[in-house]
Image (cartoon, helix red, strand yellow):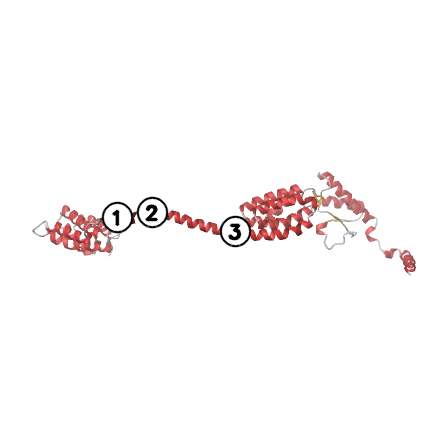
Amino acid sequence: MTFGPAVGNVGMYVAREMLTSVPEDQRQAYLRMVEEISELKYQLGVEVARQLPRLLAERDQELVARYLRQVTSVAAAGWKSGVEVAKQLPDLYEAPDKTLAGAYVDIVSRATSGPGEDTETTELAGELDRLERTLREMEPKVKRANELRTQLAARDRRDEKRRKHAVELAAALPPILARLRPRFRGTYLTLVREVAAADPEASLEAADTLLDLLNGERVSEQGATEWVARGLEVLDRSKEMGRGYFRLGSKHSLEVLEDLKEGLALKDVARVLKLYATALSGRDVAIRATTEAQGLDPYGAGHIVLPPEMRVFEDDAGNFSAYKVAAAHGAGRIEFGTYIFSLGDIPSTVAELRRRYTQEAR
């Protein structure tokens, strides 16, 4: 049974006939009083809801206040006693002897609460109260201790993983150092040490990559230092991304490497060199980089193979001149038939050589 949003939860305790028996101007007060007393105990609210209409009908506010006060005082000692008192009090209020209700409440209250506590009980209760207070104060500390245990356990797992990769690095470094050009050794060891201090797993990747970068002269020692410095910044933000950077497995890593390359790139001057070589040799000549010439005959008559970068000089002008010299040399060989010569062109000479050297061999 519900009575609209203003009633709240008291519809659980108040039947419609109860509410209609209350004078209309007192219904809101009635509902409020039932709701307040029911907060002590559900059963208490039910009984007070039953008894209040007869008291409100007398329009004696003092009596209603007394009733609620006495029921509440007994319920504080025991809610079941409070329910029984709430049921019996209205009848006692109607008795000729007006002192009966108060005496009744006093007797039930004393019976419910029992005799006053002795000294030992008081001490035990006090000790319990202090211990409970101490336990409440310790709860945040216990929670923090559990958090620290969890964090330390996670760090132990990370440390174990770190030690595993350190062992792998110890096994991988000697053969790598044996392949490294001696002039790069100081820079290489410094850079690998920096990465290893940050993350041994990443240092395994860096050790292999730096070997290729330095031995292949894809970057200078200064360029390698800058490449590692930028990789350490990535590693600081994300271990996984940093490891990908050091194995050249990320776009960012390749872009940084491209930016750090020194010298003049063949792709920037290939068209000019093609025109130059074509003009010199008198025939159409292609320019190919050594990195893209796999499967091609390096001495073919239709192309000239050149390094992808030229680092002979410190400036682009000097490196471009070096490219032109190499292209001119290749064009000269093409022009004068160096690559199209065949032993079939000199059969008599070949026959004489075979005759002479075959006799000497005998």
Sequence-first disc among 2 and 3 = 2
Work out which quarter of the rendered image holds the N terminus and state it. bottom left
Quarter location, residue 322: top right
Which amino acid type is shown beneath numbered disc 3? Answer: Arg
Q: Residue furthest front?
A: 120
Which amino acid type is shown beneath numbered disc 2? Answer: Thr
Residue at image point 49% right, 51% down: 154
Residue 80: x %, y % from top left = 20, 56
Quarter location, residue 319: top right
Asked whether the viewer can see residue 248, the reply is no
Q: Tell me the element at label 2.
A: helix
Mark carried by residue 225: none
Residue 156 horizontal side relative to residue 134, left or right:
right
Mark nearest the camera among 1 and 2 is 1
> Badge 1, how many Cα within 10 Å: few under 14, some, many 20+?
few
How far is disc 2 from disc 3 in space, using C-alphas?
36 Å
Q: Tell me the element at label 3.
A: helix
Q: Tell me the element at label 1.
A: helix
Q: Nearer the viewer, residue 12 or 113?
A: 113
Mark nearest the camera among 2 and 3 is 2
According to the picture, the residue beneath numbered tag 1 turns out to be 123
According to the picture, the residue beneath numbered tag 3 turns out to be 158
Which amino acid type is shown beneath numbered disc 1? Answer: Glu
